Amino acid sequence: MSKEYKITPQGSLGLLALGHVGIKKWREVVEKEKLKKTNSNDDKKKK
Amino acid sequence: MSEIIVVTGIPRSGTSLMMQILEKIPIEIMTDEVRQKDENNPEGYYELEAVKGIIRDNSFLREAQDKAIKIVAPLPQFLDLSLKYKVIFMRREMDEILISQEKMLNKDQSAEREKFKTIYELHIKKTYQFLELNKIPFIDIHYSNLVSNPNYELTKLIDFLNMDLDLEKLKASINQKYYRNRLL
Amino acid sequence: MTKKRNKVLLIGWDAADWKVIFPLIEQGKMPTLSSLINRGVYGRLQTLDPPLSPMLWTSIATGMRADKHGIGGFIEPTPNGDGLRPVTSTSRKVKAIWNILNQEGYKSNVVAWWPSNPAEPINGVMVSNLYQVAKKSLTENWEMPSGTVHPESLSEVMKEFRIHPQEITLAMAHPFVPNIATDLELRKEKRTFGILKTIANAATVHAASTYLQTEHEWDFMAVYHDAIDHFSHLAMRYFPPRRPQIDEKEFNDFKDVVEAAYRFHDMMLERTLELIDDNTTVILISDHGFHSDEQRPLKIPHEPSGPAIEHSPYGIFVMAGAGIRTGGKQIAGASVLDISPTILHYLDLPVGKDMDGKVLLPCFENPKPIKFIDSWEQIEGNSGMHNEMLREDPWAAQEALQQLVELGYIEELDDDKLNQVERAKRENKYYIARNLLNGKKVNEAIEMLLEIYNESKILRYGQRLAFAYLSKKMYRRCADLIQELKQIAHEDQVKFYQNKLKDKDSDVFKNIEFEEPMYLEFIEGLLLLAINKPQDALPILEKVQQKNQNNLQVALQIAQILNQRKRYSESEIQFNKALEIDSKSQHAHYGLGISYLRRGNNDMAIEHFLSAIDLDFYMPNAHFYLGQALFKKELYEDATSAFEVAVRLKPGMTKAHKWLLEIYKTKLRNEEKLNFTLNFLKNNIVGEITLITGIDNCDWSLVESVLLKYKIPFCFDALTRDKVTNLHIRNTFLHDYTGKAIHVPNHLLSALPTNFTYRVIYLNSDLMNRNTRSENQTIHLNDLEKYERQREKIETWISSQAGLKVFYSNDFLSEIEQVDFEEFMNEN
């Protein structure tokens, strides 16, 4: 069964309802977001 | 590492008698004589007050290396497993045990004997399970045999303890008149 | 070649309730569940008493009640005997369904069942109910206690699927608490945290189960969600409509929680069903329901397991898959005890005779005969249960340690701790006793209740004991105990008010007037009914009803008394009240049928009798009175059908036969059927004799005149008396007395032959001479003793006679007794 899912860091109940697959992908997105934030913070510090 | 000799069994199974025997070998007994000798145990109880708190704190065992200590069933399940033990399990007819306990407590518990039987059988089972699960060496010594025909049981004991002992001397230490409450 | 077996997936949603689900389905908010129902069958699932989840989910998994399975509550003593811990899987004494299946070579995955810690070494994967537990803050290393996962090797993998409450985002919480978007204070609220925690728990269990579903082959899978129960306890009070006692702001904040919870579960269910194949049969259940309407209690009793008062007696049951009927057929009479037997039968395995549940055959398309064995406990095999060394009764072990304390071999436990353990032990026994009562093992329940009540004099224990005495007809003890309990209740009330004055808490659940739930009064009312004093019982029961508007039993009892008293329009109101509480009460429908029948409204009578029969076919009286109503409408064919069923269900129902005779003779003129009925009566029921017994002598003419009103001649002449004296030698004379009444002394009752039916009027000698009634005391204790003695005397004889009708008279025939007597004489 294939469904299109746009995963945001905020996530959704639908994501949780997907089960282990949804959790995994969501945490990846959350990590990426965290990294982006720390990188941009570093950039700001450099400047 | 040296071993701790633990004498166990249901209270009133001859644990004090066994302690007496061990003392005569001689093996050092770990006791504090808080419970004084009385008509139920004219030679004394050979108990250690600290054992009463074994559930909460078993550190006293570290002082017991190469000594003998009385720990009634099912308290051996609270032994410190980092130490080594040899366990002597005193066995006696359940009915005799119950009568002996009633005498000691000075109350008639005959109505509840069945209940106590179940409880004590549980204690015995738990103790054996604990010993087997943790591979702690032990032997059974039967109280009635020990008193009526000591050769067999004492030989077993000597072998188990791996000691160089005089059988006759040991036999003398067992006083017949202390085999009370014998069922006929 | 091994036969391809059907897989079974068992999903548990703790506290899920049809009353919440159906409206949501109608609104299109639970599409997955809706389609599952349509694919298969569904129904109510009756719970047990007490409705405590660890006991219930163990009953579900074993098919047995708590006295057999050993889980008696939420907590148990620690092995050291000095404290308490949550109940563990090692305390279960019998095999669960996955253990049985293990023996039979099945592979099972079990997720978060309650109780399941430590996880059992089954062939498959077990994740215990400690899996989802999270400490307040998410640390680097979120520990998972050992024993949570079997096999151990999967621990690392499973760790990753857990979701921590702190990971739950605003977006995820929004459907539950919409105001969270704007109200910052709300985000810090304790209840909000509870909601986040429960979402995380549900998501965790779900993640573990989808993983195991897809990555670890299985034949049987069981998944347990406790989220709906948590959400309901937290927020059902805010579920619309708002009641006046509920704060408006709080209502607005939390009114969406319950709906969101159910919708989220539907979403999870959708995913779960996506991941199964066509060969999997799905069973979805809950262990009890949850009051969501006017029956929601406004206060939680201050006792352990107090919140269970919010539970309702019916959970849900849905089953769909190969071999199961389809189209959303409704199944009646299912109980939590039936799940394991049904699964066993579905998989072609025998059911243990020691299981208390039954196989739900109506679910099956082509039901096969059920195979039985004595007990699965006796069948050796690799069950995957814990090593015997680990399994023990923790209460027995604790008691055993206590013995050592007494003998002076271990130190006294901390007094406080000991008291805690003792109290918990008593409470557990209380639950087991209730379970025994629920299973009709009254003697054992009495023994247990007596013990804990005497030790503690706690009101709840005493009340239950009084109820047990009543059901065993131990009226004297019941009455004595009630007096004692009233005293205790009074003292409790005084204490409560004293405490209330000190405590100015504004929480709505503490400010409501202290109400003794009136259980005592209810028992008192039942006691009066039992000794044939309905006129005294009525005012008491009405008082009880004032404070217990939603109690079905009370409403039914009152309604039935009113029916007896011919107060039909009032009984109609009460029966309708009962239906509002439980629309499926067959007794309410039956009672309404009677009240309409007696008022000549045959159409309504027919409607209600049919409803009663629909709910419970085995109601011979309902069929009988239905027949009467149909007769009155001149629908003779239908009437005979109803009467025929009545006599089939209860062959001794003479009156039904008489009606049939009447119809075949005068209305339908069916010679063949008439002769058949006549023959049947002749061969099986020789006739009815009215017996006067109890006292040996009284004013017989009084009795004669009463019976004459019912066209029954009372024969107390010398000749008859002689014959009766020699009854034990020769009894053929009785044929001459059918349709008549004779006096038979107590000691000769057992000599009566069984081929007659008897109607017995027992006259209480000692009370016959009493003229005055005491105003204040409704129950005379002396009367009760005598009453009991009388009963004992003829009890043995009564029990040997099937369907015997006995009327106990204390004051024959006073105004008070007249109505009851009429009812008695009119009974078929």
Image (cartoon, coloured by chain):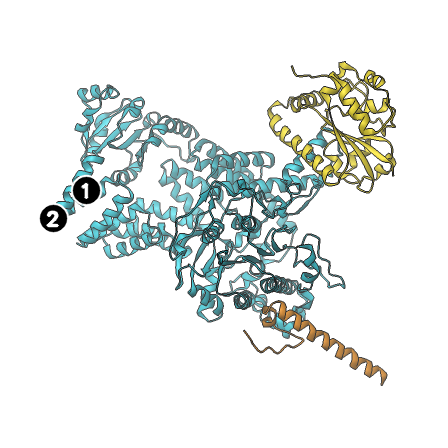
Pointer 2 and pointer 1: residues touching (CB < 8 Å)?
A: no
Q: Is residue C76 above or below residue C759?
A: below
Observer-nearest of C736 and B158: B158
For residue A40, what is the image quadrant? bottom right
The residue indicated by pointer 1 is: C658
* The hue in which chain C appears in the rendered picture of the protein: cyan
Residue at 27% x, 53% y is: C596
Colour-to-chain, yellow: B
Q: Is residue C237 visible?
A: yes
Colour-to-chain, orange: A
Q: Give how far apart the Cα atoms at labels 2 and 1 are.
A: 14 Å
The residue indicated by pointer 2 is: C669
Residue C218 image point, x, y percent: 56, 59
Is C587 positioned to the left or the right of B28 in the image? left
- Single out the mark in the foreground, 2 or 1: 2
Residue at 13% x, 50% y is: C668
Amino acid type, callout 1: Lys
For residue C729, what is the image quadrant? top left
Q: Secondary structure at mark 1?
A: helix
Q: Are marks 2 and 1 on the same chain?
A: yes
Q: Is residue C681 above or below residue C174?
A: above
